[in-house]
Image (cartoon, rainbow, N blue to C red):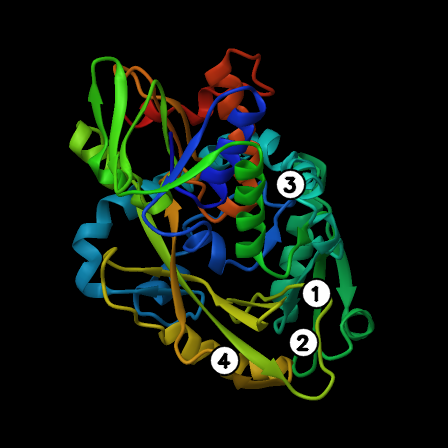
Amino acid sequence: MVLGAGMVGVSAALALQTRGRAVVLVDRRGVAEETSHGNAGIIQREAVVPYTFPRDWRVVLDYALNRRTEAHLHHWDLMGLAPWLWEHFMNSASDRVEATARAARPLVERCVTEHEAWLRLAGLEGVLRRTGYLRVYRSAERLEKDVALSAEALSRWGVVSEHISADRLRELEPHLQGPLTGGLLKPQAVSVPDPGAVGKAYAALLRERGGRFITADARALNATSGQWRLDADEGPIEAREVVVALGPWSNEALRPLGIELPLIGKRGYHKHYSVLGNAGLSRPVLDVDGGYVLAPMARGMRLTTGAEFARFDAPPTPVQIDKTEPMAREIFPLGEAVDNEAWLGRRPCLPDMLPAIGPVPGKKGLWLDFGHHHLGFTLGPVTGHLLAQMMTGETPFTDPAPYRPERFG
């Protein structure tokens, strides 16, 4: 059984099926209808160095006071979030970031080729946009700083960036406008116009090959006489091994088993817009100073926000959409909103910015594959491959030790 039908779970199921395992994919909703549906559609081949907690106290103060659009904090939820935020802050020290980047590199380097393989088999290879993505800057000073950092990232991690002047920016994306001083092109990344459709196509491939999809609540998982059992509407499901790939909901299935990892759901929003005239973008664009992404999608131009730190079940507060929409209109001719309300999703984040992949000690047949931070859509096929190798006794393509679930005690 693979619990969770987002990109991570679907990919793990496919990888296991390819190695001869009979697989049942389980979700209480449909396929790719949560986080895997609402992201910016970027497969981030450049994302070796993780998203860290800021170390500059002035930036921390701005975040605490909600002065920056890329983050929003529910102050009334701070007590519950504080332990995780502290661990995240400690793991954002330079030496720990170095260790995280070393561990992330063998995963990130494979992300495009792993997706290409499944897209080809699913008949969707043509949807892949090989145009990279653009980071654009309003502040010349911030651009200059990031150009220097990108040179270091190339030498240390093989991450390629191209410095784009303001004139060159308009050549690449003629419909960008307003107070932009230049940008950085990330040519190794690729993107798709409908990430949810990609997840659904992978699940369709699984079913074509004999896999099953079952609707059930993973919180009912229990162990019985050497098997794992889950009651579904169509009857009980039993399996020798189970993979928990429920993203930010993973602890809901693990907690009744006496297991809980330091996992939060870092919230984010998106909304679609029409465009004026013949305007368009050939790649996703990140407004670095604005803290949002404009991504051309099948449904329209998708505006995606940065992170919101709030209680998991707190009501939606899409203030970041309200703040960033006027900024987006400064640099691109957005039309009317296509969606009546902003969509809310949750990114499953562990404090050291690496996923949990591997067996749970003392729980025979229980495996984990979650906590991909901002990179679930990017890394799902990669970590599915690694997990399937571990579960079937193959030699893993990289040492899985940095991702072991028990690293949190």
Disc nearer the start of the sequence (3/1): 3
Disc nearer the start of the sequence (4/1): 1
Report the residue marked by disc 4. 325
For the residues labelled 2 and 1, say whether their Cβ atoms are less than 8 Å apart: yes
Report the residue marked by disc 2. 180
For the residues labelled 3 and 2, say whether their Cβ atoms are less than 8 Å apart: no
Identity of the amino acid at label 1?
Gly
- Using the rendered image of the protein, determine whether residue 259 is visible from the camera's viewpoint: yes
Please tell me whether residue 299 is drawn above or below residue 114 in the rendered image.
below
Front-most of residues 145 and 71: 71
Question: Disc 4 vs disc 1: which is toward the camera?
Answer: 4
Please tell me whether residue 237 is drawn above or below residue 328 in the rendered image.
above
Disc nearer the start of the sequence (3/2): 3
Identity of the amino acid at label 4?
Glu
Compared across the picture, whether 153 is left or right of 340 comes to right
Mark 2 lies on a secondary structure that is loop
Mark 2 and mark 1: Cα distance apart in space = 8 Å
Identity of the amino acid at label 3?
His
Residue 59 figure quarter: bottom left
Report the residue marked by disc 1. 183
Please tell me whether residue 49 is drawn above or below residue 325 in the rendered image.
above
Is the C terminus in the top left, top right, bottom left or bottom right quadrant? top left
Disc nearer the start of the sequence (4/2): 2
In the orientation shown, which residue stands out farthest toward the front? Answer: 234
For the residues labelled 4 and 1, say whether their Cβ atoms are less than 8 Å apart: no
Question: Disc 3 vs disc 1: which is toward the camera?
Answer: 3
Please tell me whether residue 187 is drawn above or below residue 258 in the rendered image.
below
Q: Residues within 10 Å of mark 1 (few under 14, many from 20)?
A: many
Front-most of residues 91 and 145: 91
Report the residue marked by disc 3. 115
Residue at 73 percent of width and 67 percent of height? 282
Mark 4 lies on a secondary structure that is helix
